[in-house]
Image (cartoon, rainbow, N blue to C red):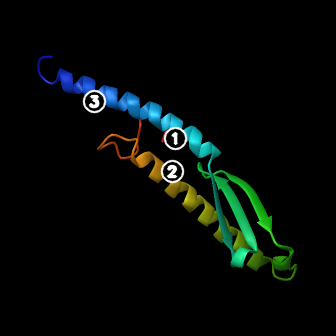
Amino acid sequence: MPGGMGNLGKIMEQVQRAAADAQKVDAELGQARVEAQSGGGLVKVAATGKAEIIEIKISKDVVDPDDVETLEDLVTVAVRDAIEKANALREERLRGVMPPGMGGQLPGGLF
């Protein structure tokens, strides 16, 4: 192809392949599960690889009506940790999918 049109075609092909691979990763992340805990396991949080919280378990040992703040702090810490783990999993899975220079972004806002 004259000029840089051959390269443009290759780039578009890479982007399309990356988009298809990213959609596959997106589906996998929806099924993946990450877990986090705080307070030595008194509060446990599970999330999908898309950082959607799917479960929170709280030990009765941490429930104290006179100290709600501690429970709130433990839940907050566990939720944040679960979200961080989900985001790290997503970045790890996408690292091999995205073409160089794309920076984790695909047209259409998939990621």
Q: Give the mark nearest the N terminus, 1 or 2.
A: 1
Q: Establish if 32 lies above or below 73.
A: above
Q: Establish if 107 lies above or below 28.
A: above
Q: Amino acid at mark 1?
A: Val
> Number of labelled discs?
3
Left or right side of 10 for 84: right
Q: CA distance from mark 3 to mark 1?
A: 21 Å
Q: Give coordinates of residue 98: x percent, y percent.
A: 38, 41
Q: Amino acid at mark 3?
A: Ile
Q: CA distance from mark 3 to mark 2?
A: 24 Å
Label 2 element class? helix
* Disc 3 target residue: 11
Left or right side of 82 for 109: left
* Disc 1 target residue: 25
Disc 3 and disc 1 in contact, CB within 8 angstroms: no
Q: Give the mark nearest the N terminus, 3 or 1.
A: 3
Q: Amino acid at mark 2?
A: Arg
Disc 1 and disc 2 in contact, CB within 8 angstroms: yes
Farthest-out residue, left: 3
- Dot label at residue 90: 2
Q: Residue at x 35, y 47 (%)?
A: 103
Disc 3 and disc 2 in contact, CB within 8 angstroms: no
Label 1 element class? helix
Left or right side of 67 for 79: left
Picture quadrant of residue 5: top left
Q: Residue at x 64, y 44 (%)?
A: 31
Q: Is residue 41 visible?
A: yes
Picture quadrant of residue 76: bottom right
Q: Residue at x 33, y 26 (%)?
A: 13
Q: Give coordinates of residue 83: x percent, y percent.
A: 59, 59
Label 3 element class? helix
